[in-house]
Structures are given as C-alpha cells and as structure tokens.
Amino acid sequence: MTDNTARLTELAKRRGFFFQSSEAYGGVAGFYVYGPEGATLKENVQDAWRDRFVRREGHMEIESPTVMPEPVFEASGHLDGFDDMILECPECGTSHRADHLVEDNTDIEEAESIPIPEVEEIIAEAELVCPTCGTDLAGEPVDDFNLMFGTNIGPGSSSPGYLRPETAQGIFVEFPRLKEYARGQLPFGVAQVGPAYRNEISPRKGLIRLREFAQAELEHFIDPETDEPPLAEVEDVEVTLYSAAEQDADGGAPQTMTVGEAVAEDVITSDWVAYYLGVAKDWYARIGVDMDRFRYRQHNEGELAHYAADCWDAEADVTAPGAEPDWVEITGFAYRGDYDLSKHGEYADEDFTIFKQYDDPITVERATVDPDMSYLGPEFGGDAAAVADALEALAERDRSAFEGDEVSVDVDGEELTVPVEKTGFAVEETTESGEHITPHVVEPSFGVDRIVYTVLAHSYREEDLGEASEDASGEAASEADDEDEERTVLSLPPEVAPKTVAVFPLMDKDGLGERAREVADELRAAGFEVAYDASGSIGRRYRRQDEVGTPFCVTVDYDTLEDDSVTVRDRDSTAQARVGLDELATRLRTLRAGETSVSDL
Amino acid sequence: MTDNTARLTELAKRRGFFFQSSEAYGGVAGFYVYGPEGATLKENVQDAWRDRFVRREGHMEIESPTVMPEPVFEASGHLDGFDDMILECPECGTSHRADHLVEDNTDIEEAESIPIPEVEEIIAEAELVCPTCGTDLAGEPVDDFNLMFGTNIGPGSSSPGYLRPETAQGIFVEFPRLKEYARGQLPFGVAQVGPAYRNEISPRKGLIRLREFAQAELEHFIDPETDEPPLAEVEDVEVTLYSAAEQDADGGAPQTMTVGEAVAEDVITSDWVAYYLGVAKDWYARIGVDMDRFRYRQHNEGELAHYAADCWDAEADVTAPGAEPDWVEITGFAYRGDYDLSKHGEYADEDFTIFKQYDDPITVERATVDPDMSYLGPEFGGDAAAVADALEALAERDRSAFEGDEVSVDVDGEELTVPVEKTGFAVEETTESGEHITPHVVEPSFGVDRIVYTVLAHSYREEDLGEASEDASGEAASEADDEDEERTVLSLPPEVAPKTVAVFPLMDKDGLGERAREVADELRAAGFEVAYDASGSIGRRYRRQDEVGTPFCVTVDYDTLEDDSVTVRDRDSTAQARVGLDELATRLRTLRAGETSVSDL
C-alpha cells in the first residue's frame, strides 16, 4: 500500500464510497459496502457499460439467480476445478494459500500453476513458517480448497446449491431458451451484470480481491465460420499491448499500435477479441481510466485455459503516478471456442446447438439396413438383435462391406455371416437444409469493483489550489484564500460522478436557504443527482464536493433574489460563471455532456 | 391459476420476460430468470423507485453484501425466529409446510400463527394425509425450519454466514457509519435495492413466492419526538384502506378516502406511514398498477410484530378483471419503533444512537458517593466492595436515604448500616448539552418481483382490433385487415416498457433495411431502448411489439427515401402520424413523457 492508496481508502471510508462490511461485529474479510457515493458511482459505471456493451451493440441483458443447483457446476467444471491450494497451520489453525506462501517467501512467481506435491517440497526445502505464529510448515499437507460458497436448497441436504462463481453460467445454462429470443440466428450477445462469489482463503487488498463482487459479462455467441466483427469501427483505436512474446523476451515491453495494425501483424489473433479490445479502450477512457496507466496483457501459455484460443487482460496500474506500478486485472477478454456450450450439451437434457441453414440444401447419400428378422431370428437366436445392430453400424461405417453376396459382423468376439439380401441394405439420397452447430463464445468479462477502484485511483489528486487557479479566472484565487491552500479532488467524468451538481446558499438566512432548496428540488425534478450543503464557508463546501468528485457547484446569493441568476463553478478548473436560473438545467446538461465548459459560459 | 394467469405466464416465457431457471437441468423451484424484456422492465421499475424514494426524497442509497456473518442475525432475531413449520412425510420423504396443509384442508385461516403442538393436534384430528403419496400424517412431528440459506465463510465451519433474508439488515448494521454521512442529524433515510433470500420449504406461484427475490427497502431514521413528515404534500391523495377494524367487522369493506382524512380520523395512526402510503399510491399508478385492483390493508393484531406500532400492506389483485380476486402483498409499510437499532446496539460493539443536541444546555443534579474504604474495609471485610456498590446504586435511586446520620443497604439479604459521613455522599450539578437517543425507523419495503408481476398482469389485455380502432384513425382498421383480428397487448407505461420504440423497414430491400437500421442506431445513440424488426408483415410486427409493450413503432418506407419522414404508430390507440426524421427523437421524448399523443401530432 502506497501512501496514496491509504489516503484514497481513508477518503473512501470517510466520504461514503466504500468500507468493510459488518464492522460493528468485527468485520468480515472480503465483504465491502458501497456507501451512498460509491453505490451511485458503481451504478453509473454499470449504466455506462450497459449503454456501450448492450444497447449500442444491440445485445440482450438478462438477470438470473445467484444461487444455482449443483449439476450446473458439474458440467461447467467448477465443482472439480475451481480450487485454490490451502495449507492449515498445525499450531494456530490459520489457513493460508500455499501458492501465496511460496510467492511471498521465495523467488518463485505464479506458484498457482505448480502441482501440489512440488509446492509441498518447496515449502519444506525453503523452510517456510506460518506467517501468523512462526510454526515450521515442512511436511504439512497442501490441499485443494473449492472456492464456491455452498448451501442447501430447501430442507435437508439432498439439493446442494452454490453461489455462482461467475455470472456467465447463468447465461450458458439458459442458452436453449435464449437462442429462441434470437430467433435461432447467430451471432447474438447476452449480457449480465450482478454479483458473483469466490470464497477466498485469505482475502486481501480491499476492493481488489473480494469474496462477493460484481461482474459485467457479455457472452457473444458466434458462428466461427461465417461471423465477422465490425472491425472497421475500431481499427484506428490505439491500444497498448503487452503480448505473450514481449513478456517472454529479454527486455520485452508493451507496444502501442492501432487495433488494425495489431490484427494485421497477428499480435491479436482473434478478430473478435481485437474488436472488443478496441471498443473497451474507448469505454475505459470515457469512464475516467487514465490511459497512461492502462494496458492490455496477453495470457501466456501457462495461464491460458486449455479451451481458450486467445485471451487478453485489461490491466490498470492503481498506484499514484511515479510509484512502483501495481498492475491489476480489471477485465478478461477470451475467445472460449465451443467449450461452455459443448459441456452443457453433454451434461444437460436440452439442445445447446443452433440449426445453421445452408444457403442451398445439399443432397447426401446415407446407407441403411432393414434386416429380415424372420431370417436372423431362427439363424442367430438370442444374438439376432445384436446382429441387426452390428449390421446397421457397419452400413454407416463402411458401405463397401455390402458389395458382395455375404457380409460378416463381429458380435461379442464371434464373426457371424449374413447373406446381403437378408440385410435389406440400401443407399438412400436425402436432402439436408442445414446442420446443428455449437456456437463459439467471445467473452469480455468486466470486474466492476476493480474498475470502480481504478476510476477512483486515477481520478484522485492532491493539489495546490494556487496552481489549479493559474489557468482559471481570478475567482479561483479567492477560493484558495478563503481556506487552506490545498485540496483533494476526484476528477471523475460527469457521467459517472455520484452527484452532478451541488447547490449552496451563500448563507442560510434571509431566504437564501429556502431559495437554494427550491433550486435543488427543481434540478432533482429535471433528473439531476443533486447535493445540498448549507454548512461552513463556501470554500469549505467546495472542498467537500471536490472530495466526492461533484463536477459543478451552484451558489445562491443575494443577487439571486434580485435577478434570478446563480454562480456555477467548475470542479477541475475552479472557473466560475453567472447563469440565469431559467437556463440552469439546460446549461448543466451541456456542461455534463462536455459540449461546453464553465469558462466558455 | 386463471386462464389469464396461464396465458400471461406463457407469454412471459415465450417473449423473454421471466421463466424458471436451470430448466436444462430440470429446474429448481423458487428461482426465476428475467429474460431480455423482463430484465429491462425490472431495471426500469427499480429506476423509477430510486427516482421517487431516493432522489426526490433526498435519501441515500447503499449497496451491501448479500452474505452476512452470523452475529448480525443473532441480533436481528432471524437466527431464532425466521422459521416456517415443516412436516416431513414418513413414507415418501416430501417436506410440507404444516400451516399450508392445515389451511388447504380445513376451514382454518392464517395457521402460521398457531403454536406447533396445536397444529399437530389439528393434523391428527382432521386426519390429514400427505398430498404427494396419501400417507396418514397423524402423530408426525412438526418442526421449526429456519428459512435462511446458510454457508461458510472461508475454510472450515468456524465462520458461518447467511444469505440475507432482507436488504434492511445491511442498512441497520452499518448505522454507526451511515449516521456520519448524515453528519449525525436526524431525520435521514437510507435505501437499498438488491437480492434477498428465503429458503422456502415448497415454493409455488412463480414470481410471487421466490427463494431468491429482489427488494427495494427504505429505512427512514427519525426522532419520534420532533420529526414530522411533509404530510401536506400527500393529504389530497385518495387511498383505498382496508383497516383492521373493517376486516374484523361483519360486512366490513375497504374504504376510499384521502390521506388527510385517514389521518384525521385515526384510520392510519402513524403520520409517517400515512405519508409513505400517499407517496407510494401515486408511484404505483405511475408505473402501471391498476388502481381498481389495488388497496392498502392494515395488519391486524395477530399479524403485527410485537415491536411494530402500525403496519399496512399494499396489496394488488393479480387476476383478470371480473375473476375471483387474488390479493397479493407487494409492499409492507411499517413503523418499527427503535427495535432494530436497539437490538444491534445491545449485541454489537458500536454506538447505534444519535446524539441529540438540546436547544439550550440543561443543568442536572447527580447524586454520587465516594465511600471511605479505610472504614468499610475493617468494618465489613469481604463485603466492603459490595457495600460500596450498594451505596452507589442507592444514591442514584433515592438520595433522601442519605438525609439522616446513618444509611442502610441490603447486601445478600443482610441489612448493613453505614454512617453517612463515611459514604462521601454529594450532589453535583452538571451541564448536559444533549442526550443519546435511539432513532425510530419507518420502513417501506417493496417486493420488486411481485410489483413487476403486478404491472404485467395489470397491463395485459386481449382485445379485438376492430374495437381498438373505433376511437382511432382509419389506419387502424387496415392493421386488423392485414392480419388476424385479435391482439394481445401489454399497455405498459413508456417509462417502464422494455423498449421505447421499434423500428421497421416496410420491406427489407431497395435500401429500406439500411435506412431503417440507421434510424434505429440514431435513436439508440439518442438514449432510447430500440427494437429492430424486418421480418414478416408490418401487421405481424405490430403484434410482436404489442405483446412486449413497446409504446411506439416507427416504419421506414419508400416515402422516407424521398422526404425523410416516417410513420409513428401508437400501441394503445393504434393511431398513426407522419413525422420528419429531424424531429423524430424530440417527438418520441414528448410522447414518452405523455406530453402529447400520436393522434395530436
């Protein structure tokens, strides 16, 4: 934790962005509350996501339950494979992540991918001790610990359920119905925004590693043979790419290029992944992620899931500028092939394929048999049915076997011979209008909490008000004179800021308070998120709004009572302008949209 | 289930409003998925709720975890008391709700409030059998079954957690911090919208009784002595009230009166509850609840929680008009007193009170003792400390006891006498600037899924298109001619309808499809939820949009290519008007806001 991180965390708690939950009962690691400012910020980030990844793309959004039955996770592989390595101290009983013990106390990186027996050996050889009580951990068993929260649905334990480890399964499992809403046509995308759960052994790093977190996931179902993304829309978007090759190379480093170049040079191998990297880059910038502290990093071979063709993480450096970078994964972009739908198709009773119509129907020849059972019965007795099945299988496999007078089949290791005329062998021509295919999946998976944290970290500034006012009007200098010379400011984009505007009466007397409350109510009715503050000096009230990132402040003063005008002040430049109340809402809308600035009013 | 209910459920599944989850694995009772249309409808209802109950009221909204640790529910009482009565069939093993068995098979109503031994007797006397297998249930034990979903936080079972049974506890438990955000001043309100869980023994009735459901709860913290709601704002709102007295009276019936009258006549005893009943009534109408199938019903004495002073449910009849009413509770409005904060204050380590400043500091006299232990020690030996404690308690209780020369206290049943001069008795004056009070709570608690279902049920209509066109333009008749004469329509208010507008090309050729897609994209960029449909006749496309409640349809035809105008069609009246593309977004905004109608264009 840098000082910056600590100060942001303190501000987040004091001003209602986020804090640990149930602190009155000692708190529970890995569970956080979004306070009033944070809940709105998060909601705004989610709305901006929906705007870009659902509405603008023409995708669907669904909402499925957070509790799902066990068979879903047998199919998805989470029941068997969603594990971390656990080691319990024999003395104090504290549970540790074995791979973290290794990473924290040896030179080994990415210990997660090392097999358990080797991890046990490393722990013994490196003479690692319990970080809590100092007990020697050599010889202690390392186990798999499943990270799903389990529960029981209904009375008794006959119907186990789990809190979903990702929102994606709630989409995959409903595919048979979702494809109907898409009228059976690929491509289509289905999104979900909501909680997911991961029962971490020892959570740390606040909002970055939670046991209950929010995901915004999009599953884009495509026909890999024919569907192409609209790559032209993003080909000129510049992205910073840290490829697997650069990560492996001595002195390798992230490269900046356009999406078009990255595809042409095969740095990104999937056009679909490239498309979403381009779209997401612009979206991150829109919500306030600093592009100087942002990159895309490709999964290297060790990280890549066996079914994934290509995978890139969006990473943000959440430290202050100039500090040692701390890259945090905030989104994963994966080309998952047909893995997810194939697994559910295998385990479930419904159809997880799409019927793909051919442009023109095709004619196929199919060999069939229709054995004469009145011959097979007396000839083979109890084996007659097995002979018939074997003949059918043979016809499908090798029709040339039926070219002679007799045909031989193997039944339970015995070779039995049948006259071809008794098999009813025939070759039929059938017309097929299409085939069933299992769609491939392109998955951008956004970690909402980490993105919210990144937006806060990247918008957090401590600055000298004298400096801030250099490029602003003379009014700003008086702001600094009024109070202390420094301020903390969150320069959040207006679209995501918890409050768009704060309304102050200059003083809470002579009717100014009443007038200011009216102004606040009118702005609320016009759809703005409005703060009202009447306490302390105007300078102190500006500082309070700066800390929570409110882009505009409106002050009602004695002139307002005369001429119905108010002072509008800009958070970042501290510039001020006088605006008539009749046009206040309109002006604030253009300010919020970035179409004008307070200095230009 | 009426036919109407069955047809609505069929439509909901076919068109993507809601359906049972994980059906590919046989489904799980009590868990539903909101499909694309339903998820947006629900989101819109929640946004309308936030607009009215958070933004317009100036309240805060937070988001706390769905998993909470056990001590929270020890304090709240859910661990001990959040039970249903369960009876397991000894033959087939099916679990039943014992109170439902009694209600379904005897004349007894509200069996939930009958003690378990009596329920067992009733089951034996009425000779009830298992509804699944017919086995006699006489003598089978009825047990309490806790309805919280349990899980374990972290490895092992040392840290049990539960899925919250209500969003409210996530607010109450954070009160010590939330009051800081309110700067320690009452009144203030804190809202939360999100999932809650109830592990029903045997869920039924689809969206009405879910194991995972969504709540929108507001906890309004008030000083009962001084805070008053702005009752004047709602005093003229007409409400239909079914009071406890009317429910008990022979031939009693709901009464319609204004909120002001209901308060004046003491039908509603809490002004705060009255205020929210008035606000909510207008809100329900705004989102599409039919006020002819809506009422407020007061809890009678048996239902009322011991701590609640007054409680009313908003109830909606979700059957078709004319059918036997089926009243469903969709919201509870409770005056909960200081119950919730007192309990947490008692169990937790933090301060759940508010410091209430007096207008003027007051001076209080306080009697204290400072016993001379060098006298008490030798005199009373091992009892000396107990004597000192008894003297202190007596001074606080009855200072007149110290008026003589000697004072007597009772220690373990023995009366011991001490000279007053050895007690150090004194009366001190102290100045107090205020006192710590535990705020009272007013709680409107909305069941989002039931409200969504009610809005769908009340907006569902099957109608003859000839009738619909009677009061519309001649164009409507041609709509009916074009296709079948009947239609199913959801007359959802534009604010909550999943899509605001659908765009059709007249045909998907001659560039009409491209032009229509451009129009759809422009409307999306302007912030509208847009559907696009190019398949089938225009009449069939109108029917599809009617079924999902899209209020406006826009058709791009050959004239569009000439004069940049389109046909706008109204869902309810089927009226049509020609609108220029340059003003389409503006017109749709005024149509959506109800400021104009298509017939007036």
Image: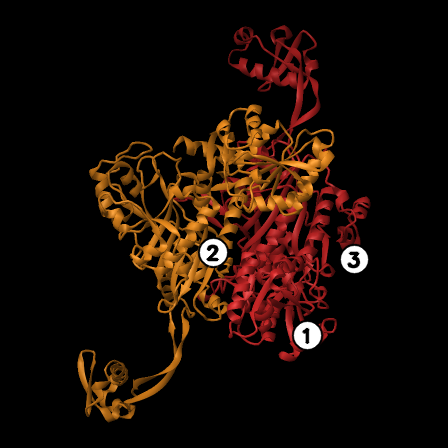
Chain colours: A red, B orange
Residue designated by label 1:
A475
Instruction: Reply above or below: B437 against A269.
Output: below
Disc 3 with disc 1 on a shared chain: yes
Which residue shows up at 51% across the image and 74% down it?
A: A510
Kindly tell me whether residue B30 is visible in this rendering: no
Q: Of discs 1 and 2, which sits in the foreground?
A: 1
Across and down, in percent, residue B336 comes to: 35, 60
Q: Amino acid at mark 2?
A: Phe
Which chain contains the residue that carries disc 3?
A
Across and down, in percent, residue B346 comes to: 36, 67
Kindly tell me whether residue B298 is visible in this rendering: yes
Across and down, in percent, residue B275 comes to: 39, 57
Label 2 environment density (alpha carbons within 10 Å; few <14, some 14–19, many ≥20): many
Q: Amino acid at mark 3?
A: Ala
Q: Of discs 2 and 3, which sits in the foreground?
A: 2
Which chain contains the residue that carries disc 1?
A
The answer to which quarter of the image holds residue A134 is bottom right
Q: Amino acid at mark 1?
A: Glu
Which residue shows up at 66% across the image and 30% down it?
A: B506
Residue A174 or residue A339, whichever sits in front: A174
Gap between marks 2 and 3 measured at Cα: 51 Å
Disc 2 with disc 3 on a shared chain: no
Residue designated by label 2:
B53
Q: For mark 1, give the secondary structure.
A: helix
Instruction: Reply above or below: A438 against A14.
Output: above
Residue designated by label 3:
A253
- Nearest to N terminus: mark 3 or mark 1: 3
Q: For mark 2, give the secondary structure.
A: helix
Quarter of the image for the C terminus of chain B: give it: top right
Going by the image, does B119 lie left or right of A46?
left
Instruction: Reply above or below: B152 against A385.
Output: below
